[in-house]
Image (cartoon, rainbow, N blue to C red):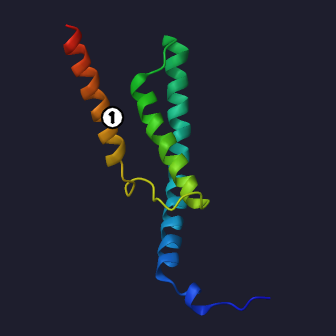
Amino acid sequence: METINKDEILKSSKWIRFIFMVLYAFALNFVLPICIGLAVIQFLFVLFTSKVNPSIANVNSYVIEFFEDSLSFLLFQTEEKPFPFKNNSEEEVVIEAEEIEDSSSKQETD
């Protein structure tokens, strides 16, 4: 059996990750009842109007992304911390670049 390395156990980065894991576990526990409430409200919209409420659907997409990112972090699939520590600047740059290309191509065809 290997000996336990005391330095590995005392690494501050591991303990900081543990603290974040506990915080995100509590956050997921808090968000779950909100998700159930949103599902019920969305069902009522579909029941009475036969249409999905776009505002709730938009919020749902952010909640799903938060769940996915948080679970990936908690289950050691990634080292990237979820919202609000997640760096979305790369995604925003790609989206802005695509929008600029689309608008410039439309202007050229006009």
Near mark 1 (Cα within 10 A), the count class, few <14, some 14-19 or many ≥20, is few
In this view of the protein, which residue sits in the foreground, 66 or 44? 66
The amino acid on which the numbered mark 1 sits, given as a three-letter code, is Ile
User: Residue sitting at 53 percent across and 72 percent down?
Assistant: 18
Residue 57 vs 7, above or below: the answer is: above
Name of the residue lying farthest toward the top: 110
In this view of the protein, which residue sits in the foreground, 95 or 26? 95
Can you give x and y, in whole percent of width and height, for residue 36 in the image? Answer: 56, 38
Name of the residue lying farthest toward the right: 1
- The quarter holding residue 56 reads top left
User: Residue sitting at 41 percent across and 31 percent down?
Assistant: 58
User: Residue sitting at 20 percent across and 13 percent down?
Assistant: 108
**Which image quarter is the N terminus in?**
bottom right
Residue 56 vs 108, above or below: the answer is: below
User: Residue sitting at 54 percent across and 45 percent down?
Assistant: 33
Q: Can residue 44 be seen from the camera position used here?
A: yes
Can you give x and y, in whole percent of width and height, for residue 92 in the image? Answer: 32, 41
Residue occupied by mark 1 = 95
Residue 41 vs 78, above or below: the answer is: above
Can you give x and y, in whole percent of width and height, for residue 22 in the image? Answer: 53, 67
**Which image quarter is the C terminus in?**
top left
Q: How many marks?
A: 1
Q: Circle 1 — which element?
A: helix
Q: Is residue 41 left or right of residue 101?
A: right
Name of the residue lying farthest toward the front: 108
Can you give x and y, in whole percent of width and height, for residue 78 in the image? Answer: 54, 58
